[in-house]
């Protein structure tokens, strides 16, 4: 499948990253994984992704810090935040740093995640 979209999931919860990765791979996506903010930032700089799913609370570097570090870089893929931080102030901060969407993980089933990504990448 040459036209398969490549995603990066940046998530420190081992169960969630595994289940989300498998679900997205079964939906035809190529999935790369990062378990902390430093790894996510390095992978974004080294690889080309069609979309990044970014958690905000991760070890070593938060998702907010990853977004800030990516500001001004060329060819940054669209980033959708998936976090359990549900406050408007967190959403506004993430969006101000360039996130293209913000979703509260606890409100979204894995099937919905696939639909969100499908519709986002069809734009």
Image (cartoon, rainbow, N blue to C red):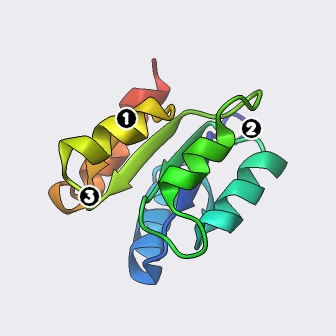
Instruction: Tell me which residue sits at (54%, 76%) in the image.
Output: 59
First in residue order: circle 1 vs circle 3:
3
Pointers 1 and 3 in contact (C-beta within 8 Å): no
**Rendering quarter of residue 51:** top right
Pointers 2 and 3 in contact (C-beta within 8 Å): no
Pick the residue in front: 105 or 56.
56
Categorize mark 2 by other alpha carbons within 10 Å: few (<14), some (14-19), many (20+).
few
Instruction: Tell me which residue sits at (43%, 31%) in the image.
Output: 96
Looking at the rendered image, the quarter that the N terminus falls into is top right
SS at badge 2: loop
**Rendering quarter of residue 43:** bottom right
Pointers 1 and 2 in contact (C-beta within 8 Å): no
List the single residue furthest toward the right: 46
Q: Which residue is mark 2?
A: 2
Categorize mark 1 by other alpha carbons within 10 Å: few (<14), some (14-19), many (20+).
some
Q: Which residue is mark 3?
A: 85
In space, the residues marked 2 and 3 are separated at their CA atoms by 36 Å
Marker count (numbered): 3
First in residue order: circle 1 vs circle 2:
2
Pick the residue in front: 18 or 41.
41
Tell whether 75 sits left or right of 122: right
2 or 3: mark nearer the eye: 3
Q: Which residue is mark 1?
A: 101
Q: Is residue 73 above or below residue 112?
A: above
Tell whether 83 sits left or right of 87: right
């Amino acid at each position: 499948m040459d036209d398969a979209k490549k995603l990066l999931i940046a998530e420190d919860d081992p169960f969630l990253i595994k289940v989300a990765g498998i679900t997205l791979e079964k939906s035809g996506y190529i999935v790369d994984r990062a378990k902390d903010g430093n790894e996510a930032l390095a992978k974004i700089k080294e690889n080309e992704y069609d979309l990044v799913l970014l958690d905000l609370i991760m070890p070593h570097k938060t998702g907010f810090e990853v977004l800030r570090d990516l500001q001004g870089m060329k060819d940054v893929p669209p980033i959708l935040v998936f976090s359990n931080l549900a406050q408007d102030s967190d959403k506004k901060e993430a969006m101000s740093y360039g996130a293209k969407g913000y979703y509260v993980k606890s409100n979204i089933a894995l099937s919905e995640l696939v639909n969100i990504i499908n519709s986002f990448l069809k734009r």
